């Protein structure tokens, strides 16, 4: 929660991993993010970027590019529209959501996987992209995760929660980052499934949000092993 340039380096030094989330962005926060990211790099801590809304405005896109130019990231976690805005110079971003044409489906899965792998090779980074099917790619391998529930798209902050989980898993497993990211995605998806199963007919997305958080709290390794739906495609 530290977003002041006056303290962010000190707070970063207390942590074992760093997530930079551009959801609520302004010039002062950008300065703090740059200091925090550079500090984390100097400590050789994992750094994850959630480029919320990349492509939605010129300021936002240029600010995220500045982060990419000055900080070495281990993982970028976003939707396909955000990734395209940053690396393909095209954007179908709809606010903070992916455009309809950038939904990942069984029909375009292989083409999207090839695109993400090529970017991962160029940038030497892991891309973790959410959609109807999630894709996690590094320069050597591509995994798909099919856990989750469509209602998760109606919960504001579910993507940010996934980014936080991803950062926690990567920080705990810095020698197996790709596997850590896949596991984080499975975890979030499974918890979305459990939460939906526990939702009452009179409850909506606010209750669903809390049930997702509760499911994360109660998830154990046995449930994770039993319900994880992931597969390697390349």
Image (cartoon, helix red, strand yellow):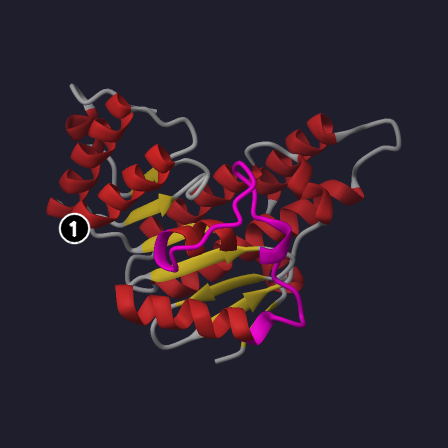
As drawn, 215 above or below 136: above
Q: Which residues are magenta?
A: 86-110
Secondary structure at numbered mark 1? loop
Residue 4, percent from left and from top: 24, 20
Q: Residue at x 50, y 55 (%)?
A: 80
Residue 105, percent from left and from top: 66, 65
- Residue 214 among magenta residues: no
As drawn, 124 above or below 169: below
Horizontal side of residue 184 vs 224, given as left or right: left
Residue closest to the eye, 31 or 141: 31
- Quadrant where the N terminus lies? top left
- Outermost residue on the bottom side: it is 234
Residue 5, percent from left and from top: 19, 22
Question: Image quadrant of residue 131?
Answer: bottom right
Q: Which residue is mark 1?
A: 44
Q: Residue at x 56, y 76 (%)?
A: 110
Q: Residue at x 65, y 32 (%)?
A: 209
Residue closest to the eye, 126 or 84: 84
Residue 56, percent from left and from top: 46, 38
**Do we see residue 21 in this rendering?**
no
Horizontal side of residue 18 vs 108, given as left or right: left
Q: Residue at x 67, y 72 (%)?
A: 107
Dot 1 alpha-carbon crowd within 10 angstroms: few under 14, some 14 to 19, many 20 or more: few
* Most frequent secondary structure within the magenta stretch: loop
Question: Image quadrant of residue 106?
Answer: bottom right
- Outermost residue on the left side: it is 42
């Amino acid at each position: 929660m530290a977003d002041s340039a006056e303290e962010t380096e000190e707070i970063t030094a207390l942590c074992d991993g760093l997530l930079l989330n551009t959801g609520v962005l302004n010039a002062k926060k950008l300065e703090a993010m740059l200091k925090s990211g550079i500090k984390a790099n100097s400590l050789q801590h994992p750094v994850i970027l959630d480029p919320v809304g990349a492509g939605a405005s010129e300021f936002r896109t240029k600010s995220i590019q500045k982060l990419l130019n000055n900080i070495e990231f281990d993982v970028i976690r976003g939707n396909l529209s955000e990734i395209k805005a940053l690396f393909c110079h095209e954007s179908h971003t709809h606010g903070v959501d992916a455009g309809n044409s950038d939904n990942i489906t069984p029909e375009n899965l292989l083409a999207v996987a090839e695109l993400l792998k090529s970017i991962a090779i160029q940038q030497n980074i892991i891309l973790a992209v959410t959609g109807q099917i999630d894709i996690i790619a590094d320069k050597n391998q591509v995994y798909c995760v099919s856990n989750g529930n469509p209602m998760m798209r109606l919960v504001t902050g579910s993507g940010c929660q996934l980014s936080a989980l991803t950062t926690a898993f990567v920080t705990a497993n810095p020698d197996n980052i790709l596997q850590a990211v896949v596991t984080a995605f499975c975890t979030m998806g499974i918890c979305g499934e459990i939460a939906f199963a526990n939702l009452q007919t009179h409850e909506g997305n606010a209750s669903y949000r809390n049930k997702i958080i509760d499911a994360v709290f109660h998830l154990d390794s046995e449930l994770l092993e039993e319900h994880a739906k992931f597969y390697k495609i390349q």
